[in-house]
Amino acid sequence: MAEGITKMLYGQDLYVQSVGVLNDLEIDGFAIAVCKEIGVELSRHRARNFEELESMGEALSGFDLIVAMSPAAQRHALDLTRMFHLSVEYWPILDPTGIGEERETKLNAYRQTRDQIHDQLREKWVR
């Protein structure tokens, strides 16, 4: 969600790559649905991890900032970036994956996460 929302807000002004601790081959359907509500298309997005990013030719040393959205991601990013001069920030964003049993409850949790990401991005890079 973060990459898609960033691209919607800032276009080419910021270069962004979404990376996780794990790489799942498919994006969560709830994330796709709630981002579509705000005009962000995620259906073709594919999650990747740090190692996959490097294998694609994207060296971590080429980035200025890593934004971690979970404690596990923050620890992993700090371990990987000890040799580089780049910043790691932690944004405590709600993980909606285990919230609720009913569809509407899950969608509301994903909307809350989407909105937290949106608000953090707007606060960080005011236009």
Image (cartoon, rainbow, N blue to C red):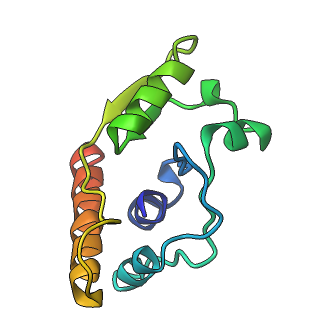
- The x, y position of residue 37, in whole percent, is 35, 85
Which residue is located at x 30 percent, y 67 percent?
114
Relative placement, left or right, of 50 versus 111 is right
Which residue is situated farthest in the top direction here?
83
Image quadrant assignment for residue 34: bottom left
- The x, y position of residue 124, in whole percent, is 26, 44
Which residue is located at x 48 percent, y 62 percent?
7
Q: Is 89 rendered above or below residue 28?
A: above
- The x, y position of residue 50, in whole percent, is 62, 38
Q: How many marks?
A: 0
Which residue is located at x 41 percent, y 84 percent?
33
Query: Which of these two is toward me, 65 or 106?
Result: 106
- The x, y position of residue 57, in whole percent, is 78, 38
Question: Which quadrant, please, contains the N terminus?
Answer: bottom left
Relative placement, left or right, of 71 versus 24 is left
Image quadrant assignment for residue 113: bottom left
Q: Is 59 rendered above or below residue 49?
A: above
Query: Which of these two is toward me, 8 or 82?
Result: 82
Relative placement, left or right, of 58 versus 116 is right
Query: Which of these two is toward me, 73 or 83?
Result: 73
Relative placement, left or right, of 91 versus 87 is left
Which residue is situated farthest in the front direction here?
101
